[in-house]
Protein backbone atom coordinates (compact mmCIF):
# COMPACT_ATOMS: atom_id res chain seq x y z
CA UNK A 1 0.00 0.00 0.00
CA UNK A 2 1.23 3.50 -0.81
CA UNK A 3 2.43 5.51 2.15
CA UNK A 4 0.34 8.49 3.29
CA UNK A 5 1.89 11.70 1.99
CA UNK A 6 1.93 14.13 4.91
CA UNK A 7 2.64 17.86 4.61
CA UNK A 8 3.39 19.83 7.76
CA UNK A 9 2.31 23.46 7.99
CA UNK A 10 4.17 24.97 10.94
CA UNK A 11 7.48 23.84 12.44
CA UNK A 12 7.39 25.13 16.01
CA UNK A 13 7.11 23.29 19.32
CA UNK A 14 4.49 20.79 18.14
CA UNK A 15 5.22 20.81 14.42
CA UNK A 16 8.84 19.73 14.65
CA UNK A 17 7.89 16.88 16.98
CA UNK A 18 5.09 15.71 14.70
CA UNK A 19 7.59 15.81 11.83
CA UNK A 20 9.90 13.47 13.75
CA UNK A 21 7.02 11.12 14.54
CA UNK A 22 5.74 11.04 10.95
CA UNK A 23 9.22 10.10 9.73
CA UNK A 24 9.18 7.10 12.08
CA UNK A 25 5.96 5.67 10.62
CA UNK A 26 6.27 2.93 7.99
CA UNK A 27 2.92 3.89 6.47
CA UNK A 28 3.65 7.64 6.20
CA UNK A 29 6.00 9.94 4.32
CA UNK A 30 6.81 13.51 5.34
CA UNK A 31 6.92 15.21 1.96
CA UNK A 32 7.79 18.67 3.30
CA UNK A 33 7.29 21.49 5.76
CA UNK A 34 6.40 25.13 5.34
CA UNK A 35 8.62 28.07 6.23
CA UNK A 36 7.85 31.79 6.35
CA UNK A 37 11.43 32.92 6.90
CA UNK A 38 14.89 31.60 7.67
CA UNK A 39 15.65 30.68 11.29
CA UNK A 40 17.43 27.99 13.27
CA UNK A 41 14.48 25.62 12.96
CA UNK A 42 14.65 25.85 9.18
CA UNK A 43 18.42 25.32 9.33
CA UNK A 44 17.93 22.17 11.42
CA UNK A 45 15.23 20.84 9.07
CA UNK A 46 17.41 21.47 6.04
CA UNK A 47 20.37 19.74 7.67
CA UNK A 48 18.16 16.67 8.14
CA UNK A 49 17.06 16.63 4.53
CA UNK A 50 13.48 17.78 5.11
CA UNK A 51 12.15 19.70 2.06
CA UNK A 52 11.11 23.27 2.88
CA UNK A 53 8.38 25.07 0.95
CA UNK A 54 8.02 28.82 1.30
CA UNK A 55 5.19 31.31 1.29
CA UNK A 56 7.05 34.35 -0.06
CA UNK A 57 10.44 34.35 1.63
CA UNK A 58 12.58 32.27 -0.73
CA UNK A 59 15.19 35.05 -1.03
CA UNK A 60 15.66 35.02 2.74
CA UNK A 61 16.36 31.28 2.60
CA UNK A 62 18.68 31.52 -0.40
CA UNK A 63 20.67 34.30 1.27
CA UNK A 64 21.36 31.84 4.10
CA UNK A 65 22.36 28.92 1.91
CA UNK A 66 19.04 27.04 1.69
CA UNK A 67 17.33 26.38 -1.62
CA UNK A 68 13.58 25.88 -0.99
CA UNK A 69 11.89 22.92 -2.65
CA UNK A 70 9.07 25.14 -3.91
CA UNK A 71 6.04 27.15 -2.82
CA UNK A 72 3.50 26.00 -0.24
CA UNK A 73 0.76 25.57 -2.84
CA UNK A 74 2.87 22.89 -4.52
CA UNK A 75 3.43 21.11 -1.20
CA UNK A 76 -0.25 21.11 -0.32
CA UNK A 77 -1.27 19.87 -3.76
CA UNK A 78 1.07 16.89 -3.49
CA UNK A 79 -0.10 15.94 0.02
CA UNK A 80 -2.76 13.43 0.97
CA UNK A 81 -3.23 15.25 4.26
CA UNK A 82 -1.86 18.38 5.95
CA UNK A 83 -1.00 18.66 9.64
CA UNK A 84 -1.54 22.28 10.62
CA UNK A 85 0.68 23.14 13.58
CA UNK A 86 0.54 26.90 13.12
CA UNK A 87 -0.23 29.33 16.00
CA UNK A 88 -3.82 29.39 17.24
CA UNK A 89 -6.42 31.00 14.95
CA UNK A 90 -4.06 30.73 11.97
CA UNK A 91 -5.27 27.20 11.25
CA UNK A 92 -8.81 28.41 10.59
CA UNK A 93 -7.49 30.95 8.08
CA UNK A 94 -5.37 28.27 6.41
CA UNK A 95 -8.40 26.03 6.10
CA UNK A 96 -10.38 28.70 4.27
CA UNK A 97 -7.47 29.86 2.10
CA UNK A 98 -5.86 26.54 1.19
CA UNK A 99 -7.39 23.32 2.45
CA UNK A 100 -11.02 23.77 1.44
CA UNK A 101 -10.32 25.16 -2.06
CA UNK A 102 -7.73 22.42 -2.65
CA UNK A 103 -10.05 19.76 -1.19
CA UNK A 104 -7.32 18.59 1.19
CA UNK A 105 -7.79 16.80 4.50
CA UNK A 106 -6.22 18.53 7.50
CA UNK A 107 -5.36 17.92 11.15
CA UNK A 108 -5.61 20.95 13.44
CA UNK A 109 -4.27 21.58 16.95
CA UNK A 110 -6.07 22.47 20.16
CA UNK A 111 -5.53 26.20 19.76
CA UNK A 112 -8.24 26.22 17.11
CA UNK A 113 -11.91 26.37 18.01
CA UNK A 114 -13.75 23.06 17.91
CA UNK A 115 -15.92 24.37 15.07
CA UNK A 116 -12.86 24.53 12.80
CA UNK A 117 -12.97 20.74 12.46
CA UNK A 118 -15.61 18.05 12.14
CA UNK A 119 -14.44 16.23 15.25
CA UNK A 120 -12.18 16.82 18.25
CA UNK A 121 -9.87 13.90 18.90
CA UNK A 122 -8.09 11.85 21.56
CA UNK A 123 -7.12 8.51 20.07
CA UNK A 124 -8.00 6.21 22.96
CA UNK A 125 -11.31 7.99 23.57
CA UNK A 126 -13.00 8.55 20.21
CA UNK A 127 -10.87 7.25 17.34
CA UNK A 128 -13.87 5.98 15.39
CA UNK A 129 -15.48 9.43 15.29
CA UNK A 130 -12.56 10.69 13.20
CA UNK A 131 -12.50 7.91 10.60
CA UNK A 132 -12.72 9.36 7.08
CA UNK A 133 -13.31 12.90 8.34
CA UNK A 134 -11.82 15.73 6.29
CA UNK A 135 -10.96 17.95 9.27
CA UNK A 136 -9.86 16.61 12.65
CA UNK A 137 -8.79 18.68 15.65
CA UNK A 138 -6.33 17.17 18.10
CA UNK A 139 -7.32 18.83 21.38
CA UNK A 140 -4.88 20.76 23.55
CA UNK A 141 -2.24 19.26 25.80
CA UNK A 142 -4.31 19.84 28.94
CA UNK A 143 -7.48 18.47 27.39
CA UNK A 144 -5.65 15.42 26.08
CA UNK A 145 -4.30 14.69 29.55
CA UNK A 146 -7.69 15.14 31.18
CA UNK A 147 -9.41 12.88 28.66
CA UNK A 148 -6.92 10.01 28.90
CA UNK A 149 -7.38 9.50 32.63
CA UNK A 150 -11.06 10.43 32.88
CA UNK A 151 -11.94 7.89 30.19
CA UNK A 152 -10.33 5.16 32.32
CA UNK A 153 -12.20 6.32 35.43
CA UNK A 154 -15.51 6.61 33.60
CA UNK A 155 -15.18 3.12 32.16
CA UNK A 156 -14.67 1.67 35.65
CA UNK A 157 -16.99 3.67 37.88
CA UNK A 158 -18.97 6.17 35.85
CA UNK A 159 -18.62 9.92 36.43
CA UNK A 160 -21.22 12.16 38.07
CA UNK A 161 -19.18 15.36 38.27
CA UNK A 162 -15.54 16.31 37.75
CA UNK A 163 -13.74 19.37 39.03
CA UNK A 164 -10.21 19.88 37.76
CA UNK A 165 -7.72 22.66 38.43
CA UNK A 166 -4.94 23.19 35.91
CA UNK A 167 -1.64 24.58 37.16
CA UNK A 168 -0.16 25.63 33.84
CA UNK A 169 3.43 26.35 32.87
CA UNK A 170 4.03 30.04 32.20
CA UNK A 171 5.87 29.44 28.91
CA UNK A 172 7.56 26.71 26.90
CA UNK A 173 11.33 26.31 27.50
CA UNK A 174 12.29 28.09 24.28
CA UNK A 175 9.67 30.84 24.54
CA UNK A 176 11.21 34.20 25.53
CA UNK A 177 8.07 36.21 24.76
CA UNK A 178 5.86 34.89 27.57
CA UNK A 179 8.23 34.62 30.49
CA UNK A 180 9.75 34.58 32.95
CA UNK A 181 6.94 35.64 35.24
CA UNK A 182 7.18 36.34 38.96
CA UNK A 183 3.52 35.72 39.64
CA UNK A 184 0.68 33.24 39.85
CA UNK A 185 -1.76 34.27 37.14
CA UNK A 186 -5.34 32.97 37.52
CA UNK A 187 -7.51 32.35 34.48
CA UNK A 188 -10.39 34.72 35.13
CA UNK A 189 -13.09 32.80 33.32
CA UNK A 190 -15.28 30.11 34.82
CA UNK A 191 -15.14 27.44 33.71
CA UNK A 192 -11.78 27.67 31.99
CA UNK A 193 -11.94 26.54 28.37
CA UNK A 194 -10.58 23.09 29.27
CA UNK A 195 -13.89 21.74 30.65
CA UNK A 196 -16.01 22.49 27.57
CA UNK A 197 -13.13 21.19 25.47
CA UNK A 198 -13.14 17.83 27.28
CA UNK A 199 -16.83 17.56 26.42
CA UNK A 200 -16.04 17.77 22.70
CA UNK A 201 -14.34 14.37 23.16
CA UNK A 202 -16.04 12.81 26.22
CA UNK A 203 -19.48 14.08 25.38
CA UNK A 204 -21.32 12.92 28.52
CA UNK A 205 -18.80 13.94 31.19
CA UNK A 206 -19.99 16.73 33.47
CA UNK A 207 -16.81 18.69 34.18
CA UNK A 208 -15.94 22.11 35.59
CA UNK A 209 -12.39 23.43 35.30
CA UNK A 210 -10.31 26.25 36.71
CA UNK A 211 -6.75 27.20 35.81
CA UNK A 212 -3.74 29.30 36.71
CA UNK A 213 -0.29 29.89 35.25
CA UNK A 214 2.88 29.67 37.33
CA UNK A 215 6.55 30.43 36.79
CA UNK A 216 7.80 27.18 35.26
CA UNK A 217 8.44 25.91 31.74
CA UNK A 218 8.57 22.16 32.25
CA UNK A 219 5.02 20.77 32.48
CA UNK A 220 1.44 21.38 33.57
CA UNK A 221 -0.03 19.81 36.73
CA UNK A 222 -3.69 18.95 37.31
CA UNK A 223 -5.55 18.37 40.55
CA UNK A 224 -8.62 16.21 39.87
CA UNK A 225 -11.69 15.66 42.05
CA UNK A 226 -14.18 13.26 40.48
CA UNK A 227 -17.49 12.27 42.02
CA UNK A 228 -18.13 8.75 40.74
CA UNK A 229 -21.34 6.78 40.31
CA UNK A 230 -19.77 3.74 41.99
CA UNK A 231 -17.37 3.75 44.92
CA UNK A 232 -13.83 3.67 43.51
CA UNK A 233 -11.17 1.29 44.78
CA UNK A 234 -7.66 2.74 44.83
CA UNK A 235 -5.81 -0.50 44.09
CA UNK A 236 -8.19 -1.36 41.25
CA UNK A 237 -7.91 2.10 39.73
CA UNK A 238 -4.12 2.21 39.98
CA UNK A 239 -4.04 -1.14 38.20
CA UNK A 240 -6.33 0.24 35.47
CA UNK A 241 -4.20 3.36 35.06
CA UNK A 242 -1.10 1.18 34.68
CA UNK A 243 -2.85 -0.85 32.00
CA UNK A 244 -4.14 2.19 30.13
CA UNK A 245 -2.20 3.22 27.06
CA UNK A 246 -0.30 6.50 27.18
CA UNK A 247 -0.54 6.78 30.96
CA UNK A 248 2.56 6.34 33.11
CA UNK A 249 2.31 5.87 36.85
CA UNK A 250 5.23 7.42 38.73
CA UNK A 251 6.07 6.77 42.38
CA UNK A 252 7.92 8.41 45.22
CA UNK A 253 9.88 5.14 45.53
CA UNK A 254 11.40 6.09 42.17
CA UNK A 255 12.18 9.51 43.66
CA UNK A 256 9.94 11.11 41.07
CA UNK A 257 8.42 13.82 43.21
CA UNK A 258 8.13 16.70 40.75
CA UNK A 259 7.78 17.68 37.12
CA UNK A 260 11.53 18.33 36.98
CA UNK A 261 12.21 14.71 37.85
CA UNK A 262 9.68 13.49 35.27
CA UNK A 263 11.59 15.38 32.58
CA UNK A 264 14.89 14.04 33.94
CA UNK A 265 13.41 10.53 33.77
CA UNK A 266 12.51 11.09 30.11
CA UNK A 267 16.05 12.25 29.39
CA UNK A 268 17.55 9.23 31.16
CA UNK A 269 15.26 6.97 29.12
CA UNK A 270 16.85 8.42 25.99
CA UNK A 271 13.64 10.00 24.72
CA UNK A 272 13.95 12.30 21.71
CA UNK A 273 14.33 15.86 23.04
CA UNK A 274 13.73 14.50 26.55
CA UNK A 275 10.00 14.29 25.81
CA UNK A 276 7.35 12.51 27.90
CA UNK A 277 4.26 12.02 25.70
CA UNK A 278 2.60 9.86 28.35
CA UNK A 279 0.30 11.42 30.92
CA UNK A 280 2.04 10.96 34.28
CA UNK A 281 0.06 10.21 37.45
CA UNK A 282 1.53 9.91 40.94
CA UNK A 283 0.53 6.57 42.41
CA UNK A 284 0.61 7.84 45.99
CA UNK A 285 -1.67 10.76 45.09
CA UNK A 286 -4.63 8.59 44.11
CA UNK A 287 -7.14 8.75 46.97
CA UNK A 288 -10.80 7.98 47.67
CA UNK A 289 -13.30 9.38 50.17
CA UNK A 290 -16.68 7.73 49.71
CA UNK A 291 -17.52 8.07 46.03
CA UNK A 292 -15.11 10.98 45.65
CA UNK A 293 -11.88 10.26 43.79
CA UNK A 294 -8.80 12.48 43.93
CA UNK A 295 -5.59 12.29 41.91
CA UNK A 296 -2.72 14.43 40.64
CA UNK A 297 -1.29 14.26 37.14
CA UNK A 298 1.37 15.98 35.05
CA UNK A 299 1.27 16.85 31.34
CA UNK A 300 4.31 17.48 29.16
CA UNK A 301 2.84 20.24 27.03
CA UNK A 302 5.46 19.93 24.28
CA UNK A 303 4.86 16.28 23.43
CA UNK A 304 1.63 14.78 24.79
CA UNK A 305 -0.34 15.52 21.61
CA UNK A 306 2.30 14.15 19.22
CA UNK A 307 1.02 10.54 19.17
CA UNK A 308 -2.53 11.87 18.83
CA UNK A 309 -1.55 13.66 15.62
CA UNK A 310 -0.20 10.44 14.14
CA UNK A 311 -3.34 8.49 14.98
CA UNK A 312 -5.51 11.35 13.72
CA UNK A 313 -3.76 11.11 10.34
CA UNK A 314 -4.59 7.43 10.07
CA UNK A 315 -8.19 7.91 11.17
CA UNK A 316 -8.80 10.75 8.72
CA UNK A 317 -7.31 8.64 5.93
CA UNK A 318 -9.79 5.85 6.64
CA UNK A 319 -7.84 3.50 8.93
CA UNK A 320 -10.43 1.92 11.24
CA UNK A 321 -8.44 -0.18 13.72
CA UNK A 322 -7.89 2.19 16.65
CA UNK A 323 -5.87 -0.23 18.77
CA UNK A 324 -3.56 -1.18 15.91
CA UNK A 325 -2.91 2.47 15.13
CA UNK A 326 -2.24 3.31 18.78
CA UNK A 327 0.07 0.32 19.19
CA UNK A 328 1.96 1.18 15.99
CA UNK A 329 2.41 4.78 17.01
CA UNK A 330 3.45 3.89 20.54
CA UNK A 331 6.07 1.41 19.37
CA UNK A 332 7.51 3.84 16.84
CA UNK A 333 8.11 6.62 19.36
CA UNK A 334 9.05 4.46 22.34
CA UNK A 335 5.89 4.47 24.49
CA UNK A 336 5.61 1.25 26.48
Image (cartoon, grey):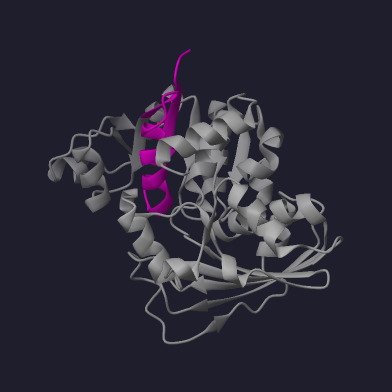
Q: Is residue 201 left or right of residue 66?
A: right
Q: Is residue 335 above or below residue 259?
A: above
Residue 237 image point, x, y percent:
69, 58
**Magenta residues, start to end:** 1-30
The residue that appears at 33% across and 70% down in the rendered structure is: 176
Q: Is residue 239 left or right of residue 18?
A: right
Spot the residue most to the top.
Answer: 1
Q: On the image, which quarter does residue 47 sit in?
A: top left
* 222 falls in the magenta region: no
- Left or right: 251 with respect to 122? left
Could you tell me residue 266's position as x and y percent? 37, 56
Task: Tally the marks.
Answer: 0
Report the side of 285 relative to 280 (left or right).
right
User: Residue reaching furthest bottom?
Assistant: 182
Q: Position of residue 278 (x, y in %)?
A: 50, 52
| Residue 13 visible | yes
For image coordinates 68% across by 61% down, the residue present is: 235
The quarter of the displayed image where residue 6 is located: top left
Q: Quadrant of residue 320?
A: top right
Residue 9 in sight from this viewpoint: no
75 or 225: which is nearer to us?
A: 225
Q: From the top left corner, tell me how far across and down residue 286 is, in percent.
A: 65, 68
Residue name at image x 77 percent, y 52 percent: 156
Indicate yes or no whether the magenta region holds residue 7. yes
The one of 171 and 235 positioned closer to us in this rendering: 235
Amino acid sequence: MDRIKVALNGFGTIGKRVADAVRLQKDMELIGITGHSYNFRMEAANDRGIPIYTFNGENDFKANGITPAGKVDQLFQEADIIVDATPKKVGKDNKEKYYVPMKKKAIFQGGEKAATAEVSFVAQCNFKEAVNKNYVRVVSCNTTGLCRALKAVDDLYGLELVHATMVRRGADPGDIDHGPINAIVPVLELPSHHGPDVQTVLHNVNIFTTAMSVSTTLMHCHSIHAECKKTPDVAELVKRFKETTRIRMVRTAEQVNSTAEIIELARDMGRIRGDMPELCLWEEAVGVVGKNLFYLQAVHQESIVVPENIDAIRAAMGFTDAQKSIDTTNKSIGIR
